[in-house]
Image (cartoon, rainbow, N blue to C red):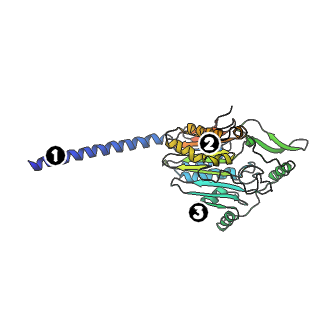
Amino acid sequence: MKDRRSFLKTAALGAAVFSLDSIASAADAQGKKNLVKGKPIVVSTWDFGRAANSAAWDILKKGGRALDAVEAGVRVPEADPNNHTVGYSGFPDRDGRVTLDACIMDELGNAGSVAALEHVTHAISVARLVMEKTPHVMLVGDGALQFALANGFQKENLLTPESEKAWKEWLKKSEYKPVINIENKSYDSNPAGATAFNPLMLPGNVYNHDTIGMIAMDANGDLSGACTTSGMAFKLHGRVGDSPIIGAGLYVDNEIGAATSTGVGEEVIKIVGSHLVVELMRQGYPPEAACKEAVTRIVKRSPSKAKEIQVGFLALNKKGEVGAYCLQQGFSYAVLNNEKNNVLINGKSYFK
């Protein structure tokens, strides 16, 4: 009798454990099912994000890794001679030297970064090698260049005639200050031969340029991100903004989501902006609300300065939900997945 009671008790306990395991498995399966709807997906800042997204999507749609996708994606604007704020043909610093900043982060929390890198177009690929081939996170200046050359990159002149012309025109006044949505301005010559910075239409046109930040989630639900820039036009030599700073210009947490930033990097660094956005999403904030809170903190820190500059954040959570928010009107971002065909969206802004 005792053996029979023991058997029944053990059987009942086993059934209960089996039932709990089944519930857990079902919940996990449902969670994965819900996740599938939003993946794969790639998002990036500004209008040229669409061309970058297309390159990333070529990898994602084949089941490729998000890390490979974001690197391939941002290499497109890095090589674009018409883009004067990323990579080749970027506007130089006040001494006429083109210096690049970039960082990359994968789903495992690994990160690589370069800052004040000269003579190499694809700073993002150098940053990835820093992540994968060194025990470090960041290399800067001559050290970053030496590392790039030792790993097969070729030294080249990044200062194009157009960018050099813009720099020489700037030297006439040498006014070093951030300008709201300078990404919407481009250097060109008018028919009379005079030169000046000219505002060109609305956000979303070919001259709407800035740092490109990109985040992607692949078919496995893994996140990665990349951020690359030539920095603020005519900056002080040696100036580094938020773009190569892990936690400022980019942050990825594979359990929660990822975020990237654009605009005046100094203000983003002060609030560790992208990390802040991800931590707010951890607390339950939707992506747009998390971005808005980060922007609001910048306003609270420096109310008068905030009215004169642009900062924007872009975020993606593990559900595949996307959100953005910025200080001023004029920030756009591109979204590409199975439901959204590389659509360009205007981000909501604090100031109207």
Q: Quadrant of the C terminus?
A: top right
Given residues 177 and 250, the one toward you in this image is 177
Under mark 3, the amino acid is: His
Residue 40 in sight here: no
Marks 2 and 3, how far apart at CA: 27 Å
Amino acid bearing label 1: Leu
Which residue does the image show at 78% across and 57% down from the upper left? 97
At mark 3, the secondary structure is loop
Question: Identity of the amino acid at label 2?
Answer: Phe
Q: Based on the displayed image, in which of its 4 quarters is residue 104 positioned? A: bottom right
Q: Report crowding for label 1: few under 14, some 14 to 19, many 20 or more residues within 10 A (C-alpha).
A: few
Is 144 positioned to the left or the right of 27 in the image?
Answer: right
Give the structural element (helix, strand or loop) at label 2: strand
Residue 218 can be seen, yes or no: yes
Dot 3 and dot 1 residues touching (CB under 8 Å)? no
Q: Position of residue 165 (x, y in %)?
A: 84, 51
How far, Cα to Cα, is label 2 from label 1? 59 Å
Q: CA distance from mark 3 to mark 1?
A: 59 Å
Report the residue marked by disc 3.
Answer: 136
- The image shows residue 76, relative to residue 294, as above or below, that is below
Which of disc 1 and disc 2 is earlier in sequence?
Answer: 1
Q: Answer with left or right where residue 49 lies relative to residue 36.
A: right
Residue at the far right in the pictured view: 192
Residue 313: give its label: 2
Q: Where does label 1 land, which residue?
A: 8
- Measuring from the top left, give residue 171's x and y in whole percent: 85, 51
Is disc 2 surrounded by few (<14), some (14 to 19) or many (20+) residues within 10 Å?
many
